[in-house]
Amino acid sequence: MKRLLSSIRDGRGFDVVLVAFPLGFLFLMAGLPLLYNVLMSFQEVDMFSLGTFLRPFVGLKNYRDLFAQPETLPILVNTAIFVTGSIAGQFLLGFGLALFFWVNFPGASWLRGLFLVSWVMPGLVVGAIWNWILSGDFGVLNFILRESGVISGNIFWRSDPNYSLYAVIMANIWLGTAFNMILLSVGLSGIPTDLYEAAELDGANAWQRFWTITLPMMRSTIGAIIALGLIFTLQQFDLFAAITSGGPNNSSNVTQYWAWEQSFRQYDFAKGATISVLMIIFVMIASVVYVRSTRHEVRG
Amino acid sequence: MGIRKYAVIGALALAGVSLFGLSARAEDVKLTVWSLDRDIQPAPNLVAEFNKLNNGIQIEYRQIQFDDVVSEAMRAYSTGQAPDIIAIDNPEHALFSSRGAFLDLTDMISTSTVIKPENYFPGPLKSVEWDGKYYGVPKATNTIALYYNKDMFKAKGLDPNKPPQTWDELVDAARKLTDPAANVYGLAFSAKANEEGTFQFLPWAQMGGGSYENINTEGAVKALEIWKTIIGEKLASPDTLTRGQWDSTGTFNSGNAAMAISGPWELDRMTQEAKFDWGVTLLPVPKEGAERSSAMGDFNWAIFASSKHPAEAFKALEFFASQDDKMFKNYGQLPARSDISIPETGQPLKDAALKVFLEQLKYAKPRGPHPEWPKISKAIQDAIQAALTGQATPKEALDQAAEKIKAVLG
């Protein structure tokens, strides 16, 4: 008994406690809900059996039903477009801005801080503002495009199935660019400057320096940011709720919004859970990429 | 010092009295009421008035958000935490009554001197029925009709005293009134992919001889074709597909739409915001003399089957119903009663509109009642959106909806 106590105070027991506490916390707060969600996807869930645990087991029926629905494939495709479009836009703009501020002109760091405003704003507020910007008849975006002669008639960003998904992507890029920029700025400032000095002495031009020094040195940051971007875009819900509600005709619906719609609009909790399980798998893959990319972090 | 001493003694005495008072009141029956009404709406005020009666029943009120009513109620019921009384949206009433979650009030109503089924409009009354029994009491009611801008009618050479009465007349008028140069659309309505879209479309389908069980009748297809014409020719903003009724009617109030389909909940805002002469008329019908129909909205009162004090809860409902005659005056809502005549407000536009809405209410039909209403409604919304975005013809879209609904109805 005494040995056990002393081991907890100072020894292997202490290590075990250190590991067990966060593990227990994770299991309670994240593991159980996840498992419960997976369990629900194999059950027939009725709104009045929500409070019970043992519900009729239906095997893969929910999954089969889900893939038999005509809207499933388009929504999965939409999700893929949304994720790749958002990440590509956020990353390219963020990287461009990060490089721009890296030049370090007077007030650069101050301005860079201001860019974070978009990241700090709650998604629903961002959604409401973009809602006005994108409005068909009185929207600012249409006004600018019309006045500059890009379009002749109004584009109904939220109500035209050809544009609705891209309207949300635009808002999401605006929302996420600042975060990308900050993380990439941190990565950039971690690159030792003597590398560039040496390269300059050897006569490398700006493009060569970027291609052979900046990019390789940033590899782990970029990997991490893309993995994080994948997770964040798959979590993006508020913008859909605020701008298009997944419409019209599911043309801008994505899995995360759809799962909520199934559970809390149609009270089909099993199907909502089934969609969530599909998403868990994708997010898990992203997490693995993220963890791996941070493991090989290059430290200057 | 002396004053402070007296103050302390006084406070103690007061505490003693109130303690005594509390212990005497501990025998009061405590009820809980959930509803979405805010402080200027009926429920919290009725509860406060009821508590003032001091009749041995005290009610605790909790406000819930519109979007959370059903999920919150389900969660509470399945974990045994349900309130005694809840206000529930009428298409979702059957969801609960069919599962035995709501108390069967038929016997209590048959002996009640306050709540009499024959005093209610048939539409709202039908929404609380399940299997021939009453599982609730209509709380209020509303419906939709056609608002129109009389000034614009005059400006475009239309007779402001002869608003469109048929679908064809409506489309004609919309064509004449639409003026892209002035940013004016002929009509504003909502085809949003939520309950609002169903709420707005079902009356059209019903006038066309359809119903939710039979959504692909010829007349219903015609109705959706008219909608498609209106959207296709840009007689209404394409944003109609993603905009709710409140926002759509907002464009009418600001003079960017010449007509609008919406309900009496717009009246207060419209009297304040609309800087023009407007009127309300009954929803246009397929052709002259055709059967009228309209949507029926608003909430019902219900008592949860798990309530420990059903008799007291019913007493509270009786009190609420006894105050129905003041509902329009105090809260601007329409009681679901045919035996109450609503006094004039003194605002001519509002009073004229009220008459039309009361007339329209006679044709209001409930959505359902069916325990799986959200799924039925979703099928209809999908059809509307598929047809209006051109991804299916109105006929195809409604055929698909009919198939989905058939699967739900079993």
Image: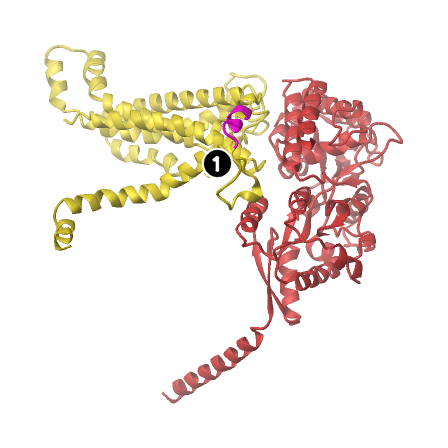
Determine whether the residue tagged by mark 1 lies in a helix, strand or loop. helix
Left or right of B173 on screen, residue B305: left
Which chain is displayed in red in the rendered image?
A: B
Residue at the disc numbered 1: A40
Residue found at the far right of this picture: B289
Q: Quadrant of residue A250?
A: top right
Nearest to the observer: residue A24 or residue B364: A24
The residue that appears at 75% across and 24% down in the rendered structure is: B216
Which chain is displayed in yellow in the rendered image?
A: A
Camera sees residue B266: yes
Left or right of B171 on screen, residue A127: left
User: In the picture shown, does residue A151 fall above or below A9?
Assistant: above
Residue A61 covered by magenta stretch: yes
The location of residue B65, given as percent across then percent down, is 56, 48
The residue that appears at 17% across and 46% down in the rendered structure is: A13
The location of residue B222, given as percent across then percent down, is 77, 22
Q: State which region is magenta.
A: A58-65
> How many callouts does the rendering have?
1
Nearest to the observer: residue B76 or residue A286: B76
Residue B7 covered by magenta stretch: no
Please state, as top left, top right, bottom left or bottom right, where the C terminus of chain A lies in the image. Answer: top left
The residue that appears at 53% across and 24% down in the rendered structure is: A64
The location of residue B85, given as percent across then percent down, is 63, 56
* Dominant secondary-structure state across the stretch colored magenta: helix
User: In the picture shown, does residue B225 fall above or below B312?
Assistant: above
The location of residue B265, given as percent across then percent down, is 69, 45
Nearest to the observer: residue A144 or residue B211: B211
User: In the picture shown, does residue B160 fall above or below B312?
Assistant: above
Disc 1 marks which amino acid? Met
Q: Chain of mark 1?
A: A
